[in-house]
Amino acid sequence: MTRRPHTVSIADDDRARIPFALIAVLLLVSSIAIVGVLESRETPDVDTDQALAMDRAESVAIAELRQAVVRATEDAAGAPVTSTDGADAPVSAAMDDDEAVFDQYLKLLIYREVSESFASAHQQFDGETTAEASVERIDWSDSDDLEAAIDRVSLEKGESGVLTVAVDGIELTVDETEGQPVTERRELSVTVGTPLYQLKNRTDEFQSQLNTGFFESDGQYDGFGRYFAARMYPYAWGKAYYDRLASGDRAFHNLTPNEHTEVMVNDAVFGLQEKTFGTTDPYKDRAMLLPTLCMAGDLASSAGDIETSDFLPDGEASTLSNRTNLCDAI
């Protein structure tokens, strides 16, 4: 018969036993020591006023940057520059051949507007703290400074007339009455809505259309050459046919006087303008009405011996009544 091993219950076994009272005393002493160490440490000094001032300085800078970009895009749209021809030597030297002149021109306008805006923009609160923003001043007659200004501005053209502008090297300064000024350099960006590049693209297309000759057009009815030919051909053909039919003189005389050609040219230009921009110059009617009437009067007079006075009300005194055609009065 096997014997079962001798066992002792935990309650009856007192070997290697640590009194719970001793553990409690150890925990108490440790807690007191930790609290003492924490109490002896200095209270951390968190400068909330300065951090708040820096945030406010950034808010002021972003607001001013957005307004500066809007003004710069309006200036660029009103007076676009797409070539350095005729520009001052420092400006020409600062331009990068690998980047569009118009983009670099816009960057300089933005930097100028930002510099002027930041110079007068600052915020003061608590009566002791002033927050302001600034950019590095440049010499506008120095090509190196102009090139640096262009490099600090970046443009990102989005869809539907959205432009994102980022300016690097903006200094945010917080100045306290009883402390030293604190300055941080940051890159700030804003996104604005502007039709600037949409207008530029259409203007470039319009210029390209004006420079397209009759045989240079890709489409059947495209470019100034074909727009002008579509107006001049029936005029010249009809006038030549009438002159040969109604006159016994077989010699061809001047079929297209300069005044009539000018009407055809202007009408072709306005036609291209409407095709490209969807509208025409608001002064189109004023520019075209009188020359068109002059041409019509000349053609009618040569066709049927109609006098200019036939177009005037009876008894009306006018300097035009003594003219042989309306174009003499222009």
Image: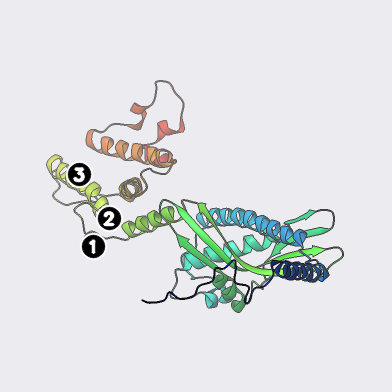
In the rendered image, residue 58, in percent from the top left (x then y), is placed at 66, 59
Specify the amino acid type for callout 3.
Lys
Query: Between tags 3 and 1, which lies in front?
Result: 1
Left or right relative to 164: residue 48: right
Residue 120 locus on image (x, y percent) = 73, 57
* Above or below, comparing residue 302 to residue 187 in the picture: above
Percent x, y of residue 234: 19, 45
The residue beneath circle 3 is 239
- From this view, report whether residue 103 is shown above or below residue 323: below
Q: What element does badge 1 sit on?
A: loop
Label 2 – label 1 distance at C-alpha: 8 Å
Give the camera-side residue of 57 and 8: 8
Quarter holding the N terminus?
A: bottom left
Q: Secondary structure at mark 3?
A: helix
Give x and y (percent) for residue 317. Answer: 46, 26
Indicate whether 301 appears above or below 138: above
Residue 223 tag number = 2
Towards the viewer: 205 or 7: 7
- Label count reads 3
Amino acid carrying label 2: it is Gly
Determine whether label 3 and label 1 are within 8 Å by CB: no
**Earlier along the polypeptide chain: callout 2 or callout 1?**
1
Q: Give 294 or 119, whichever is nearer the viewer.
A: 119
For marks 3 and 1, give the CA distance: 28 Å
Tell me if residue 52 comes above or below residue 97 in the rendering.
Answer: above
Q: What amino acid is labelled 1 in the image? A: Glu
Mark 3 or mark 1: name the one nearer the start of the chain: 1
Q: Is residue 83 left or right of residue 242?
A: right
Q: Residues within 10 Å of mark 3 (few under 14, many from 20)?
A: some
Outermost front residue: 1
Question: Which comes before the other along the chain, label 3 or label 2?
Answer: 2
